[in-house]
Amino acid sequence: MEDEKKNNCEKDKSCEDNCKKNEKEETNDDTDFIWDEYLEETDSVAAPPTSFIHVEKSLQSCFSEGMKLEVRNKEQDDAYWVASVVMTCGPLLRLRYEGYSEDRSSDFWCDIATNEVHAIGWCSENGKELIPPSAIKHKFSDWSQFLNTALAGSITIPIHLLEANGTNPIDLITQGMKIEVQEKLNPLNVWIATVLENVGGRLLLRYDGATASEDFWLFYLSYRLHPVGWASINKFKYKPPEALASRRLTDEWVDILQQALEEAKQSPLLQDIFRLQDCIREHNFKEGMKLEMVNPTNLIQICPATVTKVLNSEYFIVQIDDNSLSDKQPQVMSCHADSCLIFPKGWAKSNDLAVMHSKAGWMNSKHEFEWDEYLAFCKAEVVPDQVFNLLTVDHGFEKGMKLEAVNPFQPHQICAATVTKVVKHLLWIQLDSIDTFHPNHIVPYNSHEIFPVGWCESNHYPLKPPLHIQRGNGRVVMKVPIFIQEKPKKEKKRVNPDAKAWCPKIYFNHRCFTGPYLSNTRLAQLPRHVGPGPVVLVLKEVLSKLINVAYKSSKVLQELEFKGKHNPDMQQCVLKAKYKGKCHRKIVEILSNSEHVKEFCRDICLKLDCCPYLFGPKHVGDDCPHNCSLLTKARYASRTYSRRKRRLGRPPMAKKDENQPAKRGRKGKLLDNEETEKTNNKSEEDADSNETEILMEDAEIKNGQNKANTASNPPSSPNTNSDASKEASLSEEVESTKTPIMKFISPSILRLTTNPLHWSVEDVMQFMRDTDCAQLVRLLKDQDIDGQALLLLTLPTVQEHLELQLGPAMKLCHQVERVKLAFYSQFAK
């Protein structure tokens, strides 16, 4: 008996290895596929990520508003107090101490990874004191009674959630965990399965006692999945799936079940993981009633069908009316009240869709399906229209949109796909990865088998690319062999002439300052680098990605647009930007050889007002030489802008080598090349050898500015490295330029008589009337900007939602920074 089991195990393992090998072989050609290029080639757009409800839910935090926890009291080292979750943002929780009621002035953010967050009851178990903050101590005399009342009926944070590796549901389901699964065609039967793989919430499962050939995929939000123990609580039967039951004796299945229940206790799944599943409501379907249904074995057909069995108040079985072949496998589907692939009589015709029928012995004279004649022939009644859930949904899908979809015939395979038709809540999906003569298939808008563009890449799962790219017929992907410098001299001579056309890796240093145009959140989602490869191709891909991560992609494209005389070292390319439904195209100059890649990247950074190390051939990691990670957007933009204004007082440049490609700033000014900096900048001799170009340029500016001001101004005191002296120096230089905008870059101390947190819209207007932002008062009033909203304003927010240019936006943000500084110094104590 043991030898037989061993042979079976070896056979299962061999089958599993073969399956995995086949999967890799079928998807091994996806590495060169780039979605952005494909969308541009097909002139199409991706389906909105928010349309994929199940994916959006999978990214939500398991923490919810109102949860109670025990957190450290910041006023005392070894004391704690109870707090409520006010807001969640990934691993960050916005908390409010109990006792503050609706007062949010003392709300604070807490990272659960700091281990300073505990479930209710942790303090009593570990001998820690619960002491309220001093600001509210006077509110109650008996705080124990207050806590008893406040915690009555409240929900605390599960201990397992605090010990988990993440806060999203998909992070809490790991390989080897046990899960209960309702049988596909008989949901009343439940069996335990093991999680083999978790791909962004899409679970590869295997029934305990089954082999690798029966593995199946289900998204964790499927109504069929539950934590172990759910069946017992809800009085469902533990029974192996019908297809497997005959393979083993009853006693063997009992042993497998007992072992699975014991293993499930070792790593239990949290019930909270499934809280976003759709609830199954009671139905009113009756046995023998007729309806329309998408054929489960031919997903392009809508056919007449019959309710053949009512399982209970929640589930029933529907079978396609097809008796053309007596030995044919019945086409059945388990349904519930909200199933999206069943419809009332006449639904297809009302939406200009054909009803396919194959009921032997019935055919009308027109050879068309007519419900009235069919019902008379069958002597049956139909399901009333009001029983169906046919609510109109604004799902956001449109014909021609691109997405990623599961191949229904090979569920392990996810393909690039296109929405070819939309009818109410149904989508017709064409897999771009197979021949176009293959039929589409129908899925509902809330199907768990479709995903947004980029989902596979973000979850490290292979995507089957479009067919013409697999065959290498398209111009979307340019496959280039890896450049290897051979040892033989002859080979070396052949390769070297093309070296200038080869670009090194271009890194995205997402920890660097992103400037007013680019979103640091979106930038962090980009791949670590692009390339190596042909210069034009790599740099074009880099610029395209930068455009895509912008707050306003059209604005960034406008900044990069080619203007002026053509540079022979550049190649002109057309780049696209999609913003608010409009497609913008501009000609952009891209470097055509690798000699000046570093300068080209730095020039683009200057145009976009971001850190000069944001992207380029150098990977800087956490330690940016420019220290830009320590600055807010407003402060960095102010420093960069003031640096440019001070160039007005610089002495004439040394004569530049005409053969050297000129570098241009955002306004088209010629910038110094490295040689000019080395000859003109005397202070560089004292700089560290690792000092960056941008710091050398800053030293040059100060040197030139001091020389220009020597004739009209008395000598200034020696410069120091302290922040105070830098600020004073900057203030003097700004005053000397007499530039109106620059007068407001150096903040002045503001004394407020009232707390800005409680300002009304009128108070904000009154404050702004006395500043250089008086012209923005009406705009702030139209947007209902009160004190709280004012304190939340940032430079990107102002530019995006108030639609202000950089100059006025910086003015406004400067005033906001003054108010914030006064708030923290006077009221936030």
Image (cartoon, grey):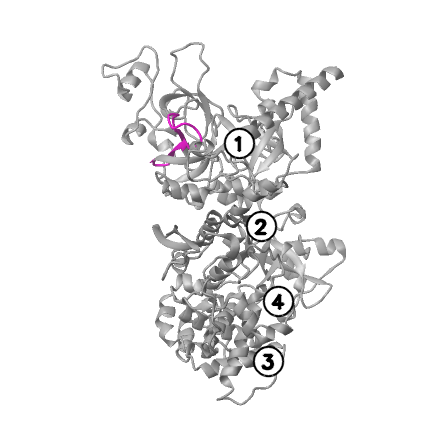
Three-letter amino acid code of the residue under disc 3: Ser
Q: What range of the chain is rendered magenta?
A: 422-442
Sequence-first tag of 3 and 1: 1
Question: Where is residue 49, by image quadrant?
Answer: top left
Q: Position of residue 132 (x, y in %)?
A: 66, 65
Left or right of 786? Residue 720 is right
742 versus 272 height, above or below = below
Closer to the camera in the image, 188 or 623: 623
Of tags 4 and 2, the one toward the viewer is 4
Q: CA distance from mark 3 to mark 1?
A: 61 Å
Q: Which residue is mark 3?
A: 725
Identify the image quadrant of the N terminus: top right
Q: CA distance from mark 2 to mark 1?
A: 37 Å
Residue 566 badge: none
Q: Position of residue 58 (x, y in %)?
A: 53, 43
Q: SS class of the residue under badge 1?
A: loop
Q: Which residue is mark 1?
A: 27
Q: Which residue is mark 2?
A: 63
Of tags 1 and 4, the one toward the viewer is 4
Q: Which residue is mark 4?
A: 691
Q: CA distance from mark 1 to mark 4?
A: 46 Å
Q: Position of residue 259 (x, y in %)?
A: 71, 27
Q: CA distance from mark 2 to mark 3?
A: 46 Å
> What residue is rendered at 42% in x and 75% in y?
763
Q: Is residue 435 magenta?
A: yes
Of tags 2 and 1, the one toward the viewer is 1
Q: SS class of the residue under badge 2?
A: loop
Q: Position of residue 530 (x, y in %)?
A: 53, 48
Closer to the camera in the image, 545 or 62: 545
Sequence-first tag of 2 and 3: 2
